[in-house]
Amino acid sequence: MTYLAKPRLLRPDTPRNTLGYTRRDYEGAISTLCAGCGHDSISAAVVQACYDLDIEPHRVAKLSGIGCSSKTPDYFLGNSHGFNTTHGRMPSVLTGAALANRDLIYLGVSGDGDSASIGIGQFAHAMRRGVNMTYLVENNGVYGLTKGQFSATADKGSKSKRGVVNNETPIDLVALALQLGASYVARSFSGDKEQLIPLIKGALRHLGPSFIDVISPCVTFNNHAGSTKSYDYVREHNDAVNRLDFILPRDRINASYPPGSLRRIVQHDGSILHLRKLDSDYDPSDRIGAMNHLQERHALGEIVTGLLYVDSSAEDLHRHLNTVEKPLNQLGDAYLCPGSKVLEALNASLRRS
Amino acid sequence: MIPTNIGAHDYFHKVVDCQWACPAHTPVPEYIRLIAGGRYSDAYMINWRSNVFPGILGRVCDRPCEPACRRGRLDQEPVAICRLKRVAADLKDDINDRLPKQPGKMNGKRIACVGAGPASLTVARDLAVIGYRMTVFDSGAFPGGMMRSQIPKFRLPDNVIDEECGYILNLGVEARYNHWVNSLRDLLAEGWDAVFVGTGAPRGRDAELPGRQEAAAHIHIGIDWLANVAFGHTSRISPRVIVLGGGNTAMDCCRSARRLGGEDVKVVVRSGFEEMKASPWEKEDAIHEDIPIINMHVPKEFVHDKGKLNGVLFELVRAEYDATGKRSLIPTGDPDVFMECDEVLVAIGQENAFPWIEKDIGLEFDQWNMPVLNPATLQSTLPKVFFGGDAALGPKNIITAVAQGHEAAISIDLFCKGRSLEDRLPPLTNLVSQKMGIHEWSYDNQVSEEERKKVPVKALEKTLKDIRLELEMGFDPYMACSEAERCLNCDIETVFTGKTCIECDACVDICPTECITFTANGEENDLRARLKAPADNLEQALYVSDVLKTGRVMVKDENICLHCGMCAERCPTGAWDMQKFFLQTAEAGMEVRKT
């Protein structure tokens, strides 16, 4: 780890996006995670995705819980809104924020402990409610901050650094998300930014709950032989079903693909997901098929990655609740608090006469 | 690409751009760090070993290092390397007891050096300390050569020259002043084991134009006039002066003229402002002293009235470039311009002259009347005679003269030992990790964001009245430290060990200038375009690793690396390490150590 901030000197030919920002403008404070932590690569992928999407930093709210993963929002998007909540409670705080102001882009950052253990109830309800957010789990299979005990996502039979074998059944957050109604579900690997960055971009531009499980090796406690979340193991067992190219409406599409190899999905905002098939039988619009495929491959020790499920016509919580479109902070006191007479009338309308 | 061979001594040397650009290969970042640490004497000695005249060069060096400085490619301006060198000279303690001594037992060989300028004195120093009896001949009364005669005192005071020539002469070097060597044949007949010729380029080019002869009393050759000023023979000049020429001598002439009574002094140059031979900073200094520089004017005639100069007539030209980039000056057709003046200083170039070398003693000259030399050994066709400095390969600068002096000294030593002159040692290099802790390095890896410091100068009204008053005051310790901190420590190299890399991308993510990429291997041009940030500077190398576990290679663009060490700090396996590369050129008398 380093105590020094990144020098501000830029190379003279540093590229800028259409807003005039450099990639560096989307960075945050210097990371205090262990050197080589997969989480830092995920932070870099978020930076790249937001830079590429020309997102105005002040339009993003990043919320997290507790843990190594939940520290990372400090290390990216330094000019965005941030909220470190209590352990496992990011989804409910985020839900509240999203209800109060639907104009922001919500990025929830969590870990396997924060989401699969203490916060599993919160995770489940955010998914089933259909909160319009990107839910990023930085999944390393261990509790890094407490020195490397197995977390709830550690695979049965995998070995800890000290040689202890895990006998408990893992929770597969991707399977849960699929089952609970997330409308954009993906898995990726921190060591493969080419795959991860487009997945994050697609999620940020998706309407509805997007969930990305990012396997992120813990170099300090879970990067040894016997681990199923090490750099080497994930590279060897990575079974990608597709490759995503994320295309903004303004972009020209130059690439051509052989017929049948590409699936093209238009999202609600006009952005396009080009899915290059790696597994010709895989259908990312088939939720039940996705769940089956996931289980089958997992039983073989393979890690399925890619965009596993997407429903481009999904609805979100605001639609379900028929909420007001304007953010609450723009409505004004008179509208938000219309007075006792209105309250009385409302109460009267609800009484059985 | 094939993996980079970082064991080859010139790979990392080239990354240290300043040291690579310096003809004498002074370890610049090393001494700059010492200055930042207040270790001025140590910094001075590193300089003294490689460039012999740190105090002099810290004031008047042509500084090829600064245009090469990596900081200049990232920031507005390079590190003020030259003026930091002066700091080491100004603020050092007494270094006499650190200087080498003449050995007690001499080797019996006698070497004559003709001329007491920088090249000869370098040869004298390098050979005196390994047992040669050195004798230096000079027609003047003092050592220093053109450093004393042609550089104005307000840029380089005599006491600095005295001090640094003194360090050499105190090594038992015999100096014969006021001694004009008028025959090489006679000199050789005295039985010297070798003769070194460091007589410079003593002849100023003249402007052969109408009126030159008639108005001769008012037209002076720049370098002769500067010498007369230096030795006090000339102390006044008329109020209106035109300086012809665009090199550094022209800048010294015009600034000297401003101090000797010149009120309306201008420099008139054939070429455009950008193409002038003078260093940018010397042009700035002239402009600072209210001296206009007029470009694209070719002198045509000295206009006089019965020998009394009235002015100079100029033809106006424009530059045109042919397909090969060769420039020609084409008259614009505008009417000629007449500029009034009382005196003219002609500073349009210097030439070599060897009237004292007989043409029939076996020493060959080429079609330009330059001695035929082996450029690596500086040996002439007369095996005993070696050349260096401006006398060897044409007028250049002091630091080149010093570098050639070192090479000639090595040649003379090998020659006197009866060995092949090709038997030269490569430079001494060392590469050592600077890691002291998890995020602790032996160097200050925080990159300063300070701007380049300007050297404080004395008030112009005062300095224009006294030609011997040094204009620049030099950095004080605080300014020096701040400027030294701007150095990016390019000698602290990023060394990559592919075997231990786990390809976690931590270095790629942290690198502030996006130098590092992991990608499939390819040809150089292909790779350069595919990197995280395209590597457009073809002068700068790509550092390519062996093929890694995933089949990719690590490629680092050396061009804009800040040497901040963040890649090494973020590396979980120590695959990146920051290692100090230290290179010193070989010296005369060095032997390969028996192991």
Image (cartoon, coloured by chain):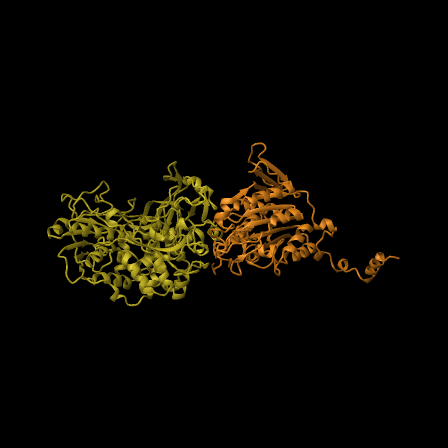
Colour of chain A in the image: orange
Direction right: furthest residue: A353
Front-lying residue, B418 or A146: A146
User: At which x and y percent is residue B560?
Assistant: 43, 50
- The answer to whether residue B498 is visible is yes
User: At which x and y percent is residue A91?
Assistant: 65, 55
- The answer to whether residue A208 is visible is no
Q: Quadrant of residue A70?
A: bottom right
Q: Quadrant of residue B145?
A: bottom left
Vertical comparison of A15 with B133: above or below: above
Front-lying residue, A12 or A348: A348
Placement of the C terminus of chain A among the 4 image quadrants: bottom right
User: At which x and y percent is residue B372?
Assistant: 21, 43
Colour of chain B in the image: yellow
User: At which x and y percent is residue B50?
Assistant: 28, 56
Direction bottom: furthest residue: B94
Q: Residue at x 28, y 44 (%)?
A: B208
How many circles with numbers are drawn on the protein?
Answer: 0
